[in-house]
Image: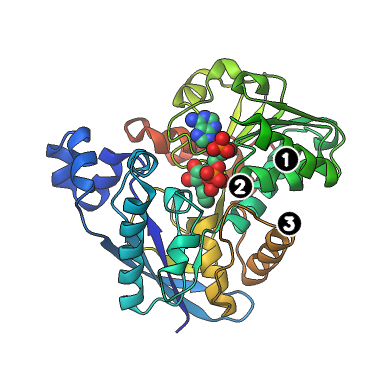
Amino acid sequence: MDNFAFVIHPLNPKQDVARKYPLLARVLPTALIHFFSRFWPPVYLSHITGVRSEATGEEIEGWLLACPFTARQMVRLPPQTVYKKIVRTGHLAQRLGARILGLGAFTSVVGDGGMTIARRLNIPVTTGHSLTVAVVIETLMEAARCRDIRPELATMAVVGATGSIGSACAELLAPMVAELVLIGRRESRLAQVRTQAEAAGARSVRTSTQVEDIREAHLVLSATSAARPIIQPQHLKHGAIVCDVALPPDVSRRVAQEREDILLIEGGEVNVPGEVDFGFDFGLPPGKAYACMAEAMVLALEGQYESYSLGRQIRAEQVREIARLARKHGFRLPDKSAVSSQRLAVSSRRQLSTRLPADRRKKYVPC
Ligand SMILES: NC(=O)c1ccc[n+]([C@@H]2O[C@H](COP(=O)([O-])OP(=O)(O)OC[C@H]3O[C@@H](n4cnc5c(N)ncnc54)[C@H](OP(=O)(O)O)[C@@H]3O)[C@@H](O)[C@H]2O)c1
């Protein structure tokens, strides 16, 4: 059977550790979870079944594995220490018989974007960034249509525009919008992304190192590796659509609490074809996966066992090709009402104690 493995890691230490070790999460303070996770070995989480291609009818299987480092640790520890544990997780995937390994969240961000990890394993590795970019752009365009925002007249801000996902999104969005505002930390790198966007057909491009400069944007896409919220309620234009791709999120939970006018979408989620059973609650509703996870599934369904997305540079053709394959096998954006209700879904996911009942979420249908 064609197959894949996917690596995740704790984003919110208390909440995510509780999904696997409820007792430990109850007794250990967050600081100790951070500390012990350094010494914890890779964890087998579950066997994934029921992913079935709409094109061929083929079913594949997969394995969900955890690399027990938090995002904060992956940023702070030396890359070699982090690589070592991700590679050990990859060895576990190899022992299970996985034919491709997908890297989730910060396991794909650390160091050189998966290149070193791929060199140290005997199976192909993919970050999933190509499909993430495709899905995020489609989600934003669909949300704009729902809210009667015409992209060709709108200002679009990309936060983390110098990153792997951010720069690819900037290039692909460039010809679709009236103005592009690129936000990053380094002027020199921003200038390169600006040149790239102009070559792709951007009409007007501004660059800035201040996140406050997203204030004029009708559409905001955020994909930084800050590992903490950097977008606050006061940064956003009235009625803006914000797509937060970052894991952990870039957008403060205060935005969902204080700004009823903002449509906040957790970017990069897709519906998986078939009757998928992940065997583990990693925080998304049943049947949904992160696009980066879906990329490994698409490649397995296609029998295309290659390191598809690796490193910091994602090419536009790669994005278009994986989007075509994903559509062919039946991966879809969450339906319109789900996209429109995500503002509530996001806030409920991030604050489980305030989870809203499903019937209340369904009332949000702006399209
Ligand atoms: N939803 C999904 O399916 C999915 C899939 C994959 C990844 N992700 C998430 O997407 C995010 C981006 O991933 P990536 O691989 O594109 O990362 P990346 O290549 O490392 O780029 C990160 C970007 O964030 C900027 N940045 C880092 N720290 C910052 C801070 N403190 N304040 C402001 N900007 C900061 C970086 O600026 P410099 O260039 O100056 O360093 C860079 O522009 C990560 O959070 C990752 O977990 C989500």
Discs 3/1, front: 1
Label 2, label 3: how far apart the Cα atoms are: 11 Å
- The one nearer the camera, 1 or 188, is 188
Quadrant of the rendered image containing residue 35: top left
Packing grade of label 1 (10 A; few <14, some 14-19, many >=20) is few
Amino acid identity at mark 1: Gln
> Circle 2 sits on which residue?
165
Residue 337 visible: no
> Circle 3 sits on which residue?
316
Discs 2/1, front: 1
Q: Residue at x 32, y 70 (%)?
A: 91
Report the quarter where the C terminus lies: top right
- Identify the element where label 3 is drawn: helix
Amino acid identity at mark 3: Ala
> Circle 1 sits on which residue?
192
Quadrant of the rendered image containing residue 204: top right
Q: Residue at x 84, y 32 (%)?
A: 178
- Identify the element where label 2 is drawn: helix
Residue 88 in the image: state x and y as whole percent.
Answer: 30, 64
Contact flag, marks 2 and 1 (Cβ < 8 Å): no
